[in-house]
Amino acid sequence: MEQYEIRRNSTVEFDPMCDKSNPQKISFEDVSAAAFRIQSGIIKTPCVKSHMSSKYGMDIYLKNDFLQNTGSFKERGARNALLLLSPEAKERGVISASLGNHSQGLSYHAKQLKIPTTVVMPNVAPIMKIEKCKSFGANVIIHGHDMKEAKHHAMTLSKEKNLTYINGYDHPHIMAGQGTVGLEILEQVPDIDAVLVPVGGGGLLAGVATAVKHLKPHVLVYGAETEKCPSMEVALAKDEPVNVEIRSTLADGLAVPTVGYNALATIKPLIDRMITVHEDWIARAILRLVEQEKFVVEGGGAVCVAAIMAGLVPELAGKKVVCILSGGNIDTTILGRCLERGLAAEQRLVKFKVTVSDRPGGIAELCKLIASIGVSIKDIIQERAWVYGDIFSVRVKAVCETRGPEHTNELRSMITNSYREWYFSRECDLSHRRPSTDSLDDVIH
Ligand SMILES: Cc1ncc(COP(=O)(O)O)c(C=O)c1O
């Protein structure tokens, strides 16, 4: 690959390294050269057998790239792209737009390599990711409501200030760097049958597929994305990148509305399957990774485990499967919400309303009943004004913690047998789950 620099062009959005009329595929040589180039600045992260293997009937290995210095695999591509800049471009500096992980990787390595960096992040980028970029000394600009607006601004600045724009998923040097994850996986688990890769703009999948299919063509390569932004699935179906509407997702790193042209061209002949994962399963995967593996992983990083948990890859039963845990940058408040969503989806958090006597001891009796089967009350409120019928009754709304579906059923039977008026949230029954737009606040309303 040649060194490059953005040339001034009349069209602000034109990036010569990601030219839709001339998509570039990367090669195995690009990935192996990147591996050599970046090795001194990147952590070779462990790929460990998961404790969840027997539960799902496959040998699951977890490639822990969330353990990189900035908490994601994005450093690999960023370092590769920075090292390939011409001396003049290094001096002028670089610019990029990203929701956070690419910006962090770029800021961190640019600081090490003494290259001035500007990152443009939309106002929806997680606070933790914004603060980290600042701490790495980057010039951080918050602009726009989404990636499209942030990117437009970054490209405008790149032309105004003569900075090199580095696309976080479609630049060939970025994709080649990301592919080094694939090389490490093959070295760490030589006899794998399949690798599951999270997909946003497609750079990671393009790199990993290039490495894996070159060395072991029989190994299955699957991409996994969130149902809230299925941009790769749509692109493969239409045979070109298409702008899809993004809905709010807890896999913020995967919220790229249009996949890359270079990435799609590289992926198309190599990919075996794309999987779209429901958000509930992503929340459950985050919870399961915390509980079973003691790993804190962000939504985008947990999507592959979520695909397995959701039963979306039955053909991999009995096989050796690697899931890439691509990032761990999750705001603590979001982590808390994910854990609660996950507990609710696993029926370990239950909400219900029940009308009980408002005479002394009525609520105490309910609490005693709940405690008698080992269920604990997490939240409880009482409502007296909007209750019909008996004036000496009170409606109690409760959120309880149980051990799982069986325990929840026990609680439900006990309440329904002991009281006349009750209502259990439909979330207690996964077969009736609505799309995951509810929040735990619904418990109390
Ligand atoms: C944690 C995480 N996983 C996966 C991805 C997807 O990578 P790509 O955009 O190269 O498909 C991203 C993208 O930012 C990410 O942040």
Image (spheres, rainbow, N blue to C red):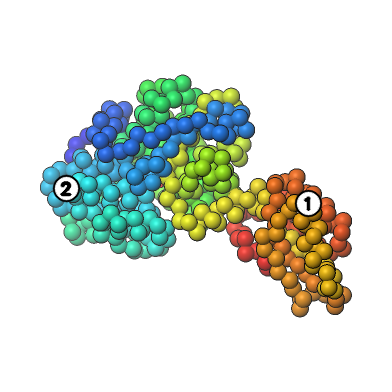
- The quadrant in which residue 82 appears is top left
In the drawing, does residue 47 fall left or right of residue 51? left
Foreground of the two, 191 or 196: 191
Cβ at disc 2 under 8 Å from ligand 1: no
Does residue 375 sit above or below 44 in this rendering? below
Mark 1 residue type = Ile
Q: Is label 1's Cβ within 8 Å of ligand 1?
A: no
Classify mark 1: residues with Cα within 10 Å, few (<14), some (14-19) or many (20+).
Answer: few
Name the residue: 57% across, 31% down: 53
Number of numbered discs on residues: 2
Under mark 2, the amino acid is: Lys
Asked if one can make out residue 75 in the rendered structure from this viewpoint, the answer is yes
Instruction: Tell me: residue 393, above or below residue 317.
Output: below
**Tag 2 residue:** 90
* Tag 2–tag 1 contact (CB < 8 Å): no
Q: Residues within 10 Å of mark 2 (few under 14, many from 20)?
A: many
Q: Secondary structure at mark 2?
A: helix
Q: Residue at x 26, y 46 (%)?
A: 109
Quarter of the C terminus within the rendering: bottom right
Q: Position of residue 12 (x, y in %)?
A: 26, 56
Residue 155 in picture, x, y percent from top left = 27, 56
Residue 373 numbered tag: 1
